Amino acid sequence: MRIFFIGDIVGRIGRKAVKEILPDLQKKHGFDFVIANGENAAGGFGLTKLVAQELYSYGINCLTMGNHTWDNKDILNIIDEYAIVRPLNYNLGSPGSGWRIFAINNKKLAVVNFIGQVFMDNNSPFDKYEQEIANIKKESDLIVIDFHAEATGEKLAFAHYVTADVSCVVGTHTHIQTADEKIIEQQTAYITDLGMTGAVDSILGMSKTSVIERFRYQIPQRFKVARGLYQLEGLLVDINDTTGKAESVLRIHQTSLK
Amino acid sequence: MRIFFIGDIVGRIGRKAVKEILPDLQKKHGFDFVIANGENAAGGFGLTKLVAQELYSYGINCLTMGNHTWDNKDILNIIDEYAIVRPLNYNLGSPGSGWRIFAINNKKLAVVNFIGQVFMDNNSPFDKYEQEIANIKKESDLIVIDFHAEATGEKLAFAHYVTADVSCVVGTHTHIQTADEKIIEQQTAYITDLGMTGAVDSILGMSKTSVIERFRYQIPQRFKVARGLYQLEGLLVDINDTTGKAESVLRIHQTSLK
Amino acid sequence: MRIFFIGDIVGRIGRKAVKEILPDLQKKHGFDFVIANGENAAGGFGLTKLVAQELYSYGINCLTMGNHTWDNKDILNIIDEYAIVRPLNYNLGSPGSGWRIFAINNKKLAVVNFIGQVFMDNNSPFDKYEQEIANIKKESDLIVIDFHAEATGEKLAFAHYVTADVSCVVGTHTHIQTADEKIIEQQTAYITDLGMTGAVDSILGMSKTSVIERFRYQIPQRFKVARGLYQLEGLLVDINDTTGKAESVLRIHQTSLK
Amino acid sequence: MRIFFIGDIVGRIGRKAVKEILPDLQKKHGFDFVIANGENAAGGFGLTKLVAQELYSYGINCLTMGNHTWDNKDILNIIDEYAIVRPLNYNLGSPGSGWRIFAINNKKLAVVNFIGQVFMDNNSPFDKYEQEIANIKKESDLIVIDFHAEATGEKLAFAHYVTADVSCVVGTHTHIQTADEKIIEQQTAYITDLGMTGAVDSILGMSKTSVIERFRYQIPQRFKVARGLYQLEGLLVDINDTTGKAESVLRIHQTSLK
Ligand SMILES: [Fe+2]
Ligand SMILES: [Fe+2]
Ligand SMILES: [Fe+2]
Ligand SMILES: [Fe+2]
Ligand SMILES: [Fe+2]
Ligand SMILES: [Fe+2]
Ligand SMILES: [Fe+2]
Ligand SMILES: [Fe+2]
């Protein structure tokens, strides 16, 4: 199957990028399933029911999250109903679920979300993986992971750690696409970061002025989503439905400037 | 002038990558000056006199540093004599200097090194830039910066902050090359991270096993430099000597597999 | 002179503690000057004009700040007029000032505020001290410092570093009073943390439920100031006006339960 | 039963403090069991077989650990044989155990060790507590916890979270004794930090010069254990064997200067 992973969608303009660019990509590449990181989709901070509905209407099939999961409390109303996948290594009893099963091509695809520990004050993704992988395998034929993390070393180490059972590990969170897409040990598709879907003329999707001010004077302020031209970034992955091995990766960076 | 920036050189195999790959690149692209990040050049941790000599003999003209600057105390013997550039935003009275002037094409090129504050416990690079930029401008015709930092937002914000006076800001430290090379406001060449020069089959240049073990069991251990095939990563930048504006950027990822 | 330092005042109940307890302490101990950390005085987050006026009306002479300095933007209207002291090691060009001179007993007392670097992403207090101490000495007869920081090692090291010129270093920020008050090298009065002025039945002055919930489920929520019985915590320091040496310290922990 | 908890023992001089001071305290207070934090007992970094033997010979009955658990690999040889308690919220499969049962007064006392998550990159202690508390209760009559953590808020929140089942939570790690010993809800004895057992004239037990140098110039160096006069710090707790409720706490700070 061919899966398209989309990097963190930031605000209204990020959703516009999906609306305008995704259909063309679908036409050109014909993917079977679209997974997007939605932690910044609602005004840059979290996800709402309306925003999730909008993104699904554009052809996204599954939304994963990250450190901004709970920024907008409206997610609590939809996290189960809409099968949103939040980091699995959250504490026990957290709302929602860290993995969900989707049926594609008569296969059960598990989409799993992890969040990093380094710099991010979360439970070890390695430890939680050990605790949960047997359950996930029991319920699924294929497994893909959105690893939402800061540190490149943690992302790479995690991907190498899970190659035996996982078809694909895509990194999110830094909002900057990396140039290291590859297939690890002829099995697991990998990229350190998918990049960002939103305003081109921005800092990580946000208005440049406010971000620069904060670094310059260290005075807290709420960042605003930037405007103008937009981009969509992600990774296209082909997985062999039978072997579970990734067979090709294609990095996507598409702007409204085409 | 054409400047080639090389991403963090990791250990003996990273130096071999420079030795084997740099001459071909020089032949093909004909650059005027080569700047490399050397903070991991000596066994993965810091720099020594012998290692610096070796790197200069391969055609590198200037070495910049980062959070591993002081890992090997031998650097204290050569930091001034060899014009090594360590982060400018270190505390006052730190050995060495945060910028050095090099004469190229009858121009005085200032090579400046900054280190990030986010996740890294350092003085604000924005603040130190304000304190020092007038002095640097007085002594130089052109300014380029190696910004050694973790957080993508800090790197991008800094680059946008300095466009008026700086021809080029290249990020280092994450050891993963990003795919976002560009020229900001038609002035300042930029990439979030140059990437890494060292072993291909590794985690950031280090042996995979030890890094994975540490994440898995959280037991400290000294990482070893990996072996095998090697790569050299960097960015080629053309700067207009008269206007100081960057005119083109070319991302380089070259492996021993050619 | 006798100076009374009050630990972080948290919210309305913290201000009530000052109103109810400070007069008795004044009667009993007869101090010449009262310095309080006000970073949490307005609803737990920052300072406003009305809150500052209220605290001054209770006998506080000087307010210092910390990582919550800018939480309430109203401080920008009064930071200079009311001689509020914010961390000196903020970036250049930040509003307000990191030290202020007060006239007491015909002496010029410099009250200086620093913020920690460890775990807190600020400029090095050691570095900024080196840059500013000559200026402060030129304008003052005596110097006292509120060092607002997390790490005990950084606080102790800083106090030992400045003994030659400073009569007193009191730590703030952790909201838990330490039992290590002393006079370093017969010169500099010291305590790692003054403690907290506010609700007794609380976590650091905040409602227990919300804090526990956040640790338990990691879901962000705005903490509310706790209620009920209150406490005032601080340190009383006697400084020899002529030599500048601290001569005695007395730790204060007073509750409404007396 | 009467339990004496001793704060982090630092190096040879810390062990000497135990040797010289503990017998007097035993004579005076007559405790039934002595628990000490041993993470810095071997030269400031970790624990060895010889050091553990020495400490047991002085009357310590149980050693707990912290972020320095694995600094000295010799601990791997004795961690089970000597019933050393390392943080429970380490990753699955880590050597040793996070709780051990000791028989005292015909009661089974569970000694549990947790490490903080805030600033420390560990699994959530709250989460691990939920996963393990039922097992611990099944095997024990009484439970006491050494919570080795940096952030005061995390320590307090954790203590309030576990009151229903735990007789005592003592904080360690900051090496500075706090003045907030108390019994939470008439059940759980508590102190934010026990303090440090080692050299008086030091920074957290280490030589002042090296620590100050590191803050001043940010150049890494191995700290050395300080010398001279010594201190022992801790907390004495009386627990009702039948109800499991703490009934009294007494903070201990004893120096060789008596
Ligand atoms: Fe994001
Ligand atoms: Fe994120
Ligand atoms: Fe680095
Ligand atoms: Fe590096
Ligand atoms: Fe604070
Ligand atoms: Fe505070
Ligand atoms: Fe510790
Ligand atoms: Fe310790």
Image: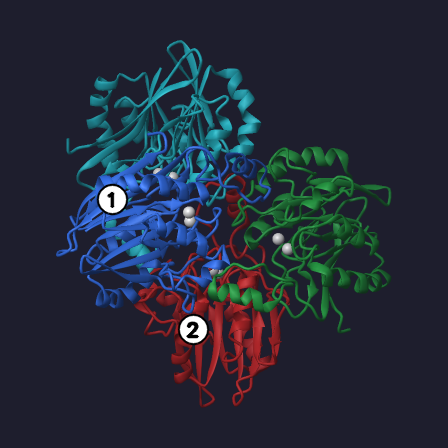
Chain colours: A green, B red, C blue, D cyan
Q: Position of residue D242 (x, y in %)?
A: 43, 11
The amino acid type of the residue labelled 1 equals: Leu
Whether disc 1's CB lies below 8 Å from ligand 6 is answered no
Circle 2 sits on which residue? B130
Q: Position of residue D86 (x, y in %)?
A: 43, 31
Task: Say the numbered circle drawn on residue C236.
Answer: 1
The amino acid type of the residue labelled 2 equals: Glu
Q: Is residue C184 above or below residue C176?
A: below
Task: Say the numbered circle drawn on residue B21.
Answer: none
Residue drawn at x 44%, y 48% is C40
Q: Is residue B232 visible?
A: no
Left or right side of B179 for B110: left
The image quadrant that residue A175 belongs to is bottom right
The verdict on a common chain for dots 2 and 1 is no
Q: Is residue B57 above or below residue B255?
A: below
Which circle, 2 or 1, is nearer the viewer?
1
Q: Position of residue B39 (x, y in %)?
A: 44, 63
